[in-house]
Image (cartoon, grey):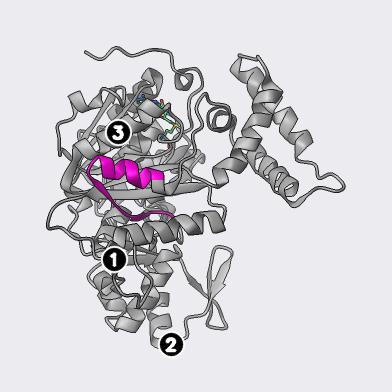
Amino acid sequence: MTTLANPTPYDRVAYPTTVFAQTHPERLAVLARLAGLDPVPPCEARILEIGGGTCVNLMSMAAMWPGCDAHGFDLSTNAIARGQEIAEAAGLGNVTLAVEDICEAHHRYPAGSFDYVIAHGVYAWVPPHVREATMRLAAHVLSDRGVAFISYNAMPGGHVRQIMREMLLDAIGEIDDPEERIAAVRDFLESYARPQDGDEPLATALRQQAENMLQRPDAVLFHDELGPCFHPQRLLDVAAAGHACGLAFLTDAGRNRQLDGFLPDGASVPDDPEAAVLLAASRDDYASLRYFRQSLFVKRQHGRMIDRTIDATRIANLWMSTRMARQEDGSFVHGADSMVIKDEALADAIERAAAVYPQRVPVASISTDPEHLRVLLQLYIEWYVSLFTAPAPFPPSPAERPQCSPLVRGMLELGEAMLCTLDHGVLKIEQAELRALLRAADGQRTIAEIAALGTGIPPEDTLAALTACCTKALMKV
Ligand SMILES: C[S@@+](CC[C@H](N)C(=O)[O-])C[C@H]1O[C@@H](n2cnc3c(N)ncnc32)[C@H](O)[C@@H]1O
């Protein structure tokens, strides 16, 4: 039986775990398919989250796919207890959470038992022996068609963060009390962030980083900046650690990094394509002072080859959604970015897809023209378009007996304001009437019965309010 040392720092101060789009098995599956692999459909997959805190990220997946089998663990008893409370309130029968140590977890989980393995924010925040055990565990539990996600503070940006860390640790000295540590760090950051005459460019960059740190929640500052372990990793070292455990580097899951595992367009295939893409990505890390990586791994098997040439036609049988908003001049806006799609037919098709967001449309309904698919792939890499292996697990309009997501219901019951949506996002809902409406939508009552309940929403507005909940991915199909 595993003996667990408690309390951990994460028991003293709860980590504000949330959902992470880049860990989503749909994203992992799409990238694997782009490399010519055959990943397990996420909706029926076995998923493991390592060091998941409350594992709300995992539960968000379990809520959207009742057919998946979701397991998560963490060393923090408090985090897992909170996660179990949420899973129970949500009635998520496909979620199993455990208090477990990464170093012992191979006893609990059999070899090859998971199709998606996620370790977000763990690898560079634990001592070396736990880091090694994390990679060993990922390799041990990964199935033959599986994809593992491992994120970490990366080099060379880690050097810069290390400078900040040394200043922060110096500022808190021997203070042990969490609240006092956080207060001391905030005092220091506020003063340090002020620009000084004659600042060198590096000092300017560090002061900017201090400014950014001030925006982070207390608990994130406490753990990510002041925690006992901070071991940023070089991509090549992480890939070598994966190799030693029988894993091959697939690619990176981050924005604009998803082609890191692929050869440049038109390049001839070298003898060792994996080594070539890793070297190029590693050089780029140094050229751009990268500080975070989200590496994907698959099993290195005889006879199985990752195709590292980019073939955009591989996305033709996927589904897509987009929030790209067409402007009067025909261009598109996405967040703060704007872009022009020169091909009118493609631009019109993207506009039609955006009109049904967050619903997904078959990529083939947008176009099957290889040139158009290349444009869509580029938009995907830049995170302007999302790709999926299946249609949305939430409806465009309320069913006869509308049912809100089980996880939303559970979180409402526990009084949480931030709710996990069925498109793996979070949404803050504080309005009492809307919360009452969502709780009333239990899949048993008709819309008329919900309207008659007196949720606070005028009965004549109930349908519109439920439709709005559908467009926020809060309702189940
Ligand atoms: C920075 S937090 C990240 C939590 C979550 N994955 C996220 O990204 O929000 C690191 C997590 O790793 C867990 N952890 C650290 N060492 C561990 C170990 N030996 N076994 C299991 N979990 C561990 C901590 O308890 C904590 O919840």
Q: Which residue is mark 3?
A: 90
Mark pair 2, 3: CA separation: 46 Å
The one nearer the camera, 51 or 260, is: 260
Per the image, the residue denoted by label 1 is: 308
At 33% from the left and 45% from the top, the residue drawn is 240
**Element class at badge 3:** helix
- Crowd around label 2: few <14 · some 14–19 · many ≥20 (10 Å): few
Ranked by sequence position, the earlier of labels 2 and 3 is: 3
The span picked out in magenta is: 237-254
Q: Position of residue 340 (x, y in %)?
A: 52, 80
Q: Which residue is mark 2?
A: 344
The residue most toward the front is 271
Q: Residue at x 29, y 65 (%)?
A: 308
Between discs 3 and 1, the one toward the N terminus: 3
| Residue 248 coordinates in the image, percent (x, y) | 26, 50
Answer whether labels 2 and 3 touch (C-beta < 8 Å): no
Which quadrant of the view contains residue 352? bottom left
- Front residue of 330 and 459: 330
Cα gap from disc 3 to disc 1, whole angstroms: 41 Å
Where, by quadrant of the figure, is residue 31 drawn?
bottom left
Three-letter code, disc 1: Arg
